[in-house]
Image (cartoon, grey):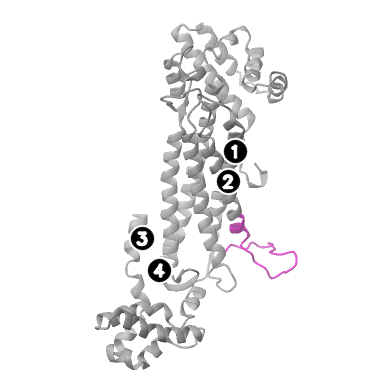
């Protein structure tokens, strides 16, 4: 985790003290249920929670010092708690294994992270919707292969982004559910020295579901799904960021990141206004996606368990969620303050001498009785003249002057095919599909 690309609420989830607090809650809840069942004295759970009620400080350094000797993080934690609580602490962890604590804790952290990310997505969706409605009918050129294609509106571009992030939200809700499980099943997952009722109780207290069959670990296909979902969200961020970057190019300049007073774009060239935020988002998306393959590779653990996944998750859990949280917030700010230039959009739309209307003329010629190949040939030969003139010639005028075209279509019909509004007649329908 790089502090430059981190926000406090998400970072707090992954702090060592926060992790140890979840460990304690798991152990204490389990002790309470075991006490109710008579497996351990009821006083054990009470002693743990009585100590917890004093709001003790988790001494991370002291736990680390114990771990330096034991070479085992969970044992180090249990030893430290025992030093604080006293003899009753010996009943902690009865019939449990380290993975019960570690895996359940990781899932609690991922659920908390998902909740923040869902809030981030809601904020982003609201910003995109506001700007989309603002520019619902702002004409601009649609591009395929980076080349002028046909007219769209800037609002439609943003509606596409809204629909994509709405899908991301649905996927994240499903991924959150996927990892919201608890395992308190003991060594190799057989409940030999504990009881399924303990697992159910701990799950209920933590707001999780029980893991139906956990071997000794919670199956990592769940986590693979979670991190894959984060990777898809990162790719959606990159897609919108790249769109802004392209639109900010000097030759296009249809939209631009907000450039604040006092901001500087280059140490050498004072005139520069660079798309640095969206370039940054493109890079951050790569970082988030880098967690996906390791998460997939964690699925194939040996037999009932190994710990090859552990070191991976210590990286990707914090790094992917913290980075994605920052990226979503940054993208929301970019969209919220995005400078949009309708006049430049119209200028670019008009730049190529009406070529963007070629399909309508093609269709009109076929409807007038020409074959599609004949129609295509007539339109293309005039369109290429306009293309090669860099838009200095007019496709409309060339078509009206072409004897073969004029023989099939009256001038007023050709002129009608150059009506920009024709392309926007279903904008309302598309918006109603996207925004309801």
SS type, badge 1: helix
Q: 42 or 322: nearer the eye?
A: 322
Say which label, 2 or 1, has the lower sequence index. Answer: 2
In this view, the mark in front (1 or 3): 1
Checking the image for residue 137, the label placed there is 4
Q: Quadrant of the C terminus?
A: bottom left
Tag in front: 4 or 1? 1
Q: Is residue 264 magenta?
A: yes
Quote the CA–CA distance across marks 1 and 3: 37 Å
Is 2 located above or below residue 388 in the figure? above
Sequence-wise, the earlier of marks 1 and 3 is 1
**Label 2 to label 4, Cα distance in Å?**
38 Å
Percent across and percent down for residue 267 are 74, 64
- Residue denoted by label 1: 318
In three-dimensional space, the C-alpha distance between marks 3 and 2, rounded to whole angstroms, equals 34 Å
Q: Residue at x 55, y 66 (%)?
A: 246
Q: From the viewer's perspective, is the residue at label 2 or at label 1 nearer?
A: 2
In the picture as drawn, the residue positioned furthest to the front comes out as: 303
- State how far apart marks 4 and 1 are (Cα): 42 Å
- The magenta stretch spans which residues? 256-280
Residue 264 location, quadrant? bottom right
Is residue 402 something that shows in the picture? Answer: yes
Q: Secondary structure at mark 3?
A: helix
**Can residue 115 be seen by looking at this rendering?**
no
* Residue located 68% across and 64% down the image: 265
Which numbered disc flags the more N-terminal residue, 2 or 4?
4
Residue 380: image location, x then y, percent:
40, 82
Whichever of callouts 4 and 1 sits on the residue coming sooner in the sequence is 4
Q: Which mark is residue 431?
A: 3
Dots 3, 4 in contact, CB < 8 A: no
Number of the label disc, if any, that sits on residue 290: 2
Mark 2, mark 4: which one is toward the viewer? 2
């Amino acid at each position: 985790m790089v502090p430059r690309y981190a926000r406090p609420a998400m970072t707090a989830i992954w702090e060592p003290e926060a992790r140890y607090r979840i460990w304690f809650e798991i152990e204490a809840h389990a002790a309470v249920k075991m006490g109710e069942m008579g497996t351990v004295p009821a006083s054990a759970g009470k002693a743990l929670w009585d100590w917890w009620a004093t709001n003790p400080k988790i001494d991370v350094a002291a736990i680390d010092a114990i771990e330096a000797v034991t070479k085992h993080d969970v044992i180090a934690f249990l030893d430290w708690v025992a030093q604080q609580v006293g003899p009753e602490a010996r009943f902690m962890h009865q019939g449990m294994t380290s993975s019960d604590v570690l895996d359940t804790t990781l899932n609690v952290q991922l659920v908390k992270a998902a909740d923040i990310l869902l809030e981030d997505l809601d904020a982003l969706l609201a910003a995109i919707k506001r700007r989309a409605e603002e520019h619902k009918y702002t004409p601009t050129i649609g591009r395929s292969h980076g080349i002028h294609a046909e007219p769209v509106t800037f609002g439609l571009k943003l509606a596409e982004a809204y629909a994509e992030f709405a899908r991301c939200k649905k996927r994240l809700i499903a991924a959150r559910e996927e990892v919201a499980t608890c395992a308190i099943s003991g060594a190799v997952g057989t409940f030999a020295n504990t009881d399924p009722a303990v697992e159910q109780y701990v799950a209920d207290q933590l707001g999780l579901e029980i893991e139906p069959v956990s071997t000794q670990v919670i199956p990592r296909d769940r986590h693979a799904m979670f991190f894959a979902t984060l990777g898809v969200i990162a790719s959606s961020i990159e897609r919108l960021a790249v769109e802004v970057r392209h639109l900010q190019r000097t030759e296009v300049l249809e939209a631009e990141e907000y450039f604040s007073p006092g901001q500087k774009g280059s140490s050498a060239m004072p005139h520069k206004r660079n798309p640095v935020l969206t370039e940054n988002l493109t890079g951050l998306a790569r970082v988030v996606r880098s967690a996906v393959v390791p998460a997939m590779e964690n699925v194939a653990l040996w037999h009932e368990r190994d710990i090859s996944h552990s070191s991976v998750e210590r990286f990707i859990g914090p790094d992917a969620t913290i980075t994605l949280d920052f990226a979503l917030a940054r993208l929301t700010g970019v969209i919220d303050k995005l400078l949009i230039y309708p006049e430049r959009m119209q200028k670019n739309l008009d730049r190529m001498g009406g070529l963007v209307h070629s399909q309508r003329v093609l269709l009109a010629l076929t409807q007038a009785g020409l074959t599609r190949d004949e129609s295509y040939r007539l339109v293309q030969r005039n369109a290429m003249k306009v293309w090669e003139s860099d838009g200095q010639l007019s496709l409309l005028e060339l078509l009206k002057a072409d004897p073969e075209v004029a023989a099939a279509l009256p001038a007023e019909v050709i002129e009608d095919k150059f009506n920009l509004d024709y392309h926007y007649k279903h904008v309302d329908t598309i918006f109603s599909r996207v925004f309801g």
